[in-house]
Image (cartoon, rainbow, N blue to C red):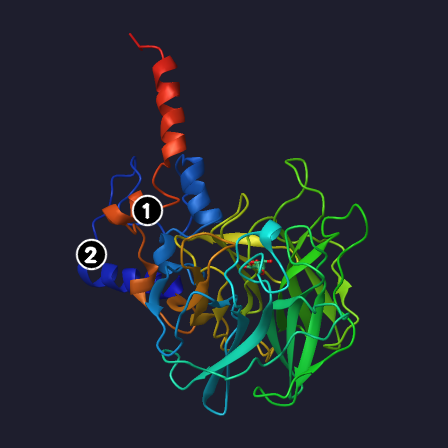
Amino acid sequence: MIKIFSKIITLGLLSGLVQADENVFPALIPTEKPTDRPISRAVERLYEQWNPLEDRDNDLYSNFKYTRLKGLEISDNISRRDPTKIIKVDGVYHVWYTGRRSKEAPEGLKKATATKPGTDWDLADIWHATSKDGWTWEEDKIPAVKRPPKPEQGFRSICTPGILMWKGKYYLYFQAYSPMVGGQAYCPVRVAYADSPTGPWTHHPEPVILPGPKGSWNNIKINDPCPIVHNGKILVYYKGAPIERGDEYVLRVQGVSFADDPLGPFIPSPKNPVINSGHETCMFPFKDGVAALIALDGPEKNTIQFSKDGEDFEIKSLIQVPPVAPGPFCPGAFSDDKKNTGFTWGLCHINIDGGGAQKSSILARFDCDLSPDVDIPYFKHNNLRFNEETYFQKNIGLNPNMTKMMKRISKKEKDMN
Ligand code: AAL
């Protein structure tokens, strides 16, 4: 904010910017909230909630540009989704993700068998890929962490990992499903640890974050574990859900648990849930606090939020076409030094048919400016517009059944005159 305002002030001094008549709101944006004239609630919000220079001077606003990755081949029964944050160790970038290499394609929970996945993240393991430049990636030949043996929790599928670096060791947290994967299947979080990002990984014997008690907001699943380090503690954020379904039950909310040791115990925040929206989790250290990219679900979908303590979040920007399940490269994610916070790129996933649970997904790269250390006006633009194909594609075009229904409704509509 200060950067652009000082540019304006210097320009003003040099060129004598146009001054307005006192009775009208000026074209030259006042740096402080005007107190000597009536202002609307909207203008008040510009100063109180937003920023008089709008998104162009908001460190927590960005748009996102996408690029296909090089090096990770695609096929019908290979799926890659839900990447972790990216870490850089000895000049090499590392990422882990849900990898499915099933003999058959997923066709829903009812048709699932021992070899046929019910969903895109069923019968999955945690895979690992490396890159020297962040654009071309090379996948290991075998999974980094394999499903544990039966009857351990997770023998059916382990997926949706989050990485933590802590005191020279590496920890992968992930969803552990058995005997079935699915909307209402029990899902705690397990962890595996290693001395190096290339493994070998050892399963910690017990799940470390469990669903909450009967009747609680997260009584059946803990999804999308997302660790960061803040104020000396390990914070693991997650999406939680109850087994109960229906309009009267919570659907997509997120909580946080704190620990001093990566293997627990994890103590849930008494304020949970701390985020009221969003699908996948994406929390990252930002300046002296924690920021969260919230996408897809809930009243605060497609926002970026900030909290000093990691528990009380406020909306800082509204975003368009955010990455799904983002795994950013956050140099400061685990250093807790309040330097190099935020990020400018990462990986996300795209479900190839635009759905959620079936078909395969691919990993893609996104670039943005959510770092206080850089200033890239290209990413601060508003007014993203889309072409014809975008509006008429599946999930955005009106589908045939709804077209029939809308025609029936229009017939019943009365003439207005
Ligand atoms: C993801 C995540 C969780 C869900 C499913 C697999 O994108 O939100 O991991 O369970 O979809």
Q: Is residue 251 above or below residue 156?
A: above
Position of the C terminus by quadrant: top left
Q: Is residue 311 left or right of residue 89?
A: right
Residue 69, given in percent of the width and then of the height, sits at 36, 73
Residue 377, given in percent of the width and then of the height, sits at 30, 64
Q: Determine crowd level at label 1: few under 14, some 14-19, many 20+ residues with C-alpha closer than 10 A.
A: few
Q: Residue furthest bottom?
A: 90
Residue 234, given in percent of the width and then of the height, sits at 69, 73
Q: Earlier in the sequence, mark 1 or mark 2?
A: 2
Residue 409, given in percent of the width and then of the height, sits at 39, 19
* Residue 392 image-quadrant placement: top left
Viewer-proximal residue among 182 and 27? 182
- State which image quarter holds ligand 1: bottom right
Residue beneath disc 2: 16
Residue 393's disc is 1
Viewer-proximal residue among 416 and 331? 416
